[in-house]
Amino acid sequence: MVGTMTDSDDRALLELLRKNARIPTAVLARRLGISRTTLQGRIERLERNGIIQGYTLIEATPQDPVRAHVSITLTPRQVSFVEKSLRSLPELRELHAVSGMSDLIAVLGAASTEAINQAIDDIGRINGVERTISAVILSTRYKLT
C-alpha cells in the first residue's frame, strides 16, 4: 500500500469492499454508520492516498490456465539488464527479488504448457541468467480473495 489508513472506519470500509466490491454505497454507509457523503469522501481520500489503486474485473474463467514459478539465479551485476529483459516477456505476471539460493522469482502465466515452456527457455537465454528452476502450478489449494 502506498498511503496509510487513518482509522478503524477506513479499515472496516476496505474489509467490506474486499468481501464484495459491488456493494452499493448506501449499504456501505449504513453498515459503517456514516452518511453517503462521508463515505464517498473516504473513498476518494483512499484513492488519492493510493490505498485504493483501481478497480478490476475478476473473470469467471482464469486468464492464465497454466502458471509457473521460475527461480532465477543471476551472474553478478546483471540484475538491471535481466529485470529489463524479463519485463518484456508477455508471460511475466510478477517478478520478485528474493533471498536464498535464487535472486529472483518470476511468476509466469500462459494459455498452454508449451507457451510456459517457451517462456522458461527464453528466460534461460537472457544474458546474465546463470540458472533457472521452474515449478508449474498444478492446482491452487488456497487463495485469499
Image (cartoon, grey):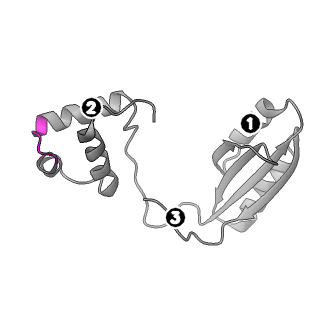
Residue that appears at 37% across and 45% down: 55
Dot 2 falls on a residue whose secondary structure is helix
- Please name the residue that numbered disc 1 is placed on: 83
Could you say which disc has been placed on residue 21 in the image? none
Q: How many marks?
A: 3
Q: Position of residue 25 (x, y in %)?
A: 17, 46
**Vertical arrangement, residue 12 with respect to residue 47, above or below:** below
Report the residue marked by disc 3.
62
Residue 104 counted in the magenta span = no
Amino acid, disc 1: Glu
Against 110, residue 138 (above or below) is below
Q: Is residue 116 above or below residue 127?
A: below
Mark 3–mark 2 Cα distance, whole angstroms, equals: 30 Å
Q: Which residues are magenta?
A: 32-37
Residue in the image at 71% along x and 65% along y:
136
Name which of mark 3 and mark 2 comes first in the sequence.
2
Quarter containing the C terminus: bottom left
Q: Position of residue 96 (x, y in %)?
A: 67, 43
Q: Give percent across and percent down for residue 49.
A: 37, 28
Q: Earlier in the sequence, mark 1 or mark 3?
A: 3
Residue wearing tag 2: 44
**Local secondary structure at mark 1:** helix
Q: Residues within 10 Å of mark 2 (few under 14, many from 20)?
A: few
Give neighbour class at mark 3: few <14, some 14-19, many 20+ (Cα, 10 Å).
few
